Image: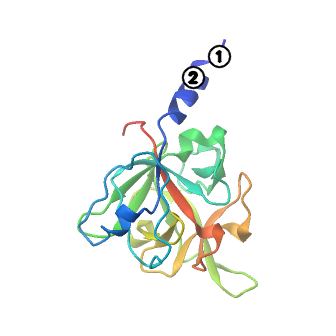
Amino acid sequence: MESSGASETVAFFFCLTIFSASPAMAAGVADGVLIGESTGEVVSAPTAVDPMIRTHFEDGMYILVPKLAPTLGMCIKDNSVDAGGNVELGGDNGIPGKVFKVQRIPNTSRYTFTNRNSGMSIEWDPLVTEVDETASPASFVTQQPVTGEMNQQWVIEEIDSGYLQIRACGQKMVLDLANGLFDEVTDIRVYQANQTDAQKWMLVKVNVGD
């Protein structure tokens, strides 16, 4: 007999709704325009999309799914509820830590991503950066108590073919799969925007309550 946890997991995935950059979104990207819930259909963006168009999403619970690994999602390592928990890619076993409350900051185009399991926000640390072989700065992303500081604020921007980039507020760096890898436990960092597939995401809305 299956456990109740397994049943909840099955029920959970029946509630997924794909949010991607769509023609409707492209038509309503000005500040103050709120994009409503999608029909559940994955819709590609127009072929010619300004990569810096800001996109508005309805506040709610989402899984952030990378283009390179559509069966995985951004999660907190080991479903941690502790400050400093690493942000990485996770599979089915990461469900509790994969759901984030995406909430728009009033009167802005910025969002916060708060993990449903821990109640903490994802942030990047401007004081802890590395430089890779291309001399580009990068910083790994962790969860931390909610502060409202700029390094916990993110801008959702259309790129192409229905995908999004998640940019660190006030920076040219975006959420990125470290070294272009896409296995479970791959670190998620902020890295110089380069429009590669390692920086393309979809927001998948889930019906799990607040």
Tell me the quadrant of the picture where the N terminus can be found: top right
Residue furthest out toward the front = 47
The percent position of residue 103, horizontal first and vertical second, equals 35, 56
Amino acid type of the residue tagged 2 in the rendering: Ser
- Crowding near the residue tagged with mark 2, few <14, some 14–19, many ≥20 C-alpha atoms within 10 Å: few
Could you say which disc has been placed on residue 2 in the image? Answer: 1
Contact between labelled residues 1 and 2, with CB atoms less than 8 Å apart: yes
Q: CA distance from mark 2 to mark 1?
A: 7 Å
Residue sitting nearer the eye, 188 or 201: 201
Amino acid type of the residue tagged 1 in the rendering: Glu
- Crowding near the residue tagged with mark 1, few <14, some 14–19, many ≥20 C-alpha atoms within 10 Å: few
Point 55% across, 77% down: residue: 127
Q: Is residue 122 left or right of residue 105?
A: right
Could you say which disc has been placed on residue 7 in the image? Answer: 2
Q: Is residue 26 left or right of residue 167?
A: left
The percent position of residue 118, horizontal first and vertical second, equals 48, 45
Q: Is residue 94 left or right of residue 83?
A: right
Tell me where residue 157 sits by quadrant.
bottom left
In this rendering, the answer to whether 56 lies above or below 37 is below
